[in-house]
Image (cartoon, rainbow, N blue to C red):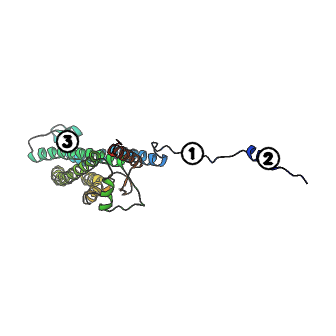
Amino acid sequence: MISTSKEETKDIELQEPKYELVTEKKDPTKKDEKEDSQDTNQKIGVTIAVAVEIYRALIASFLILFVPQKCYDEVKGDHVCSFSENAETGPDPLYNAGFVFNCLTMATFLALYYAEVRREVKLIAYLDVNTSRPSDNESVGQVLEKIQPQHKDAILYYDSLYIKAGYMTIGCFAINSVLSGLVVYKYYLDDKTTTTFITSLLFVIQKLQQVYVTLKTDKNIFYSAYLSSKVQYNDLDKDKVIKTIKEEIKEEIKEEPTKP
């Protein structure tokens, strides 16, 4: 039987390697890949949607230019109006009024898309879509209070601008559709006139329906105007949480009384 003294045992214990559990520390200033992916995907979706919708708005606004109509001259007789012929204003006051309203409607669509994009960019930057958090008006209002006042005011400003532009666009589109309809049917060509006219209107009717639904929400309910599913921004963006915490710590340090 082998025996060891207390001194030898102590020496053995001292020679045993001691291991320390090392955990990787996450840098709080770095944004999580999933969060960054959400923002990137949202911005790509907005860019593609805006490009498609501007094209549709162009067709739906300038109905007098794109809907086939019948023209007449001494050389060709009755014929389909060319694009340049449709763009020419003449002595017909109804035609001139229709063309002016075509331009005005397109201008309101551009104003709507400007407000939409600015609103969406602010929402993507400072808020996230979080299905695990409540999304009612009061809860989202509490989230907004955690954002710096200037950024909160910017979100509310562009949301208000979007509401005004939305109602203006819907109103102009309705008047333009009636007025342009009177013009194109005054110069009716054939079934192509009806088919093209209805198709052009359908290009943006669904869009305007979605706009109307978004406009009728409460003050702090921010639905996305572009993402395929009707998602709602209802939580503070994670990197903004880190910035907010850092700012609160700085404020506490400033307010802490100094020792005499």
- Residue 93 placed where, x, y %? 8, 45
Q: Judge whether residue 119 can be spotted in this image.
A: yes
Front residue of 83/208: it is: 208
Q: Judge whether residue 221 can be spotted in this image.
A: no
Q: Nearer the viewer, mark 1 or mark 3?
A: 1
Residue beneath disc 1: 24
Q: Is residue 216 left or right of residue 256?
A: left
Label 1: few (<14), some or many (≥20) within 10 Å?
Answer: few
Marker count (numbered): 3
In the rendering, which numbered label is found on residue 7? Answer: 2
Amino acid marked by disc 1: Glu
Residue 153 lies, with reference to residue 213, above or below; the image says above
Q: Nearer the viewer, mark 2 or mark 3?
A: 2
- Residue 44 placed where, x, y %? 40, 44
Which sits earlier in the primary sequence, circle 1 or circle 2? Answer: 2
In the rendering, which numbered label is found on residue 86? Answer: 3
The quarter of the image holding the C terminus is top left
Front residue of 252/187: it is: 252
Which sits earlier in the primary sequence, circle 1 or circle 3? Answer: 1
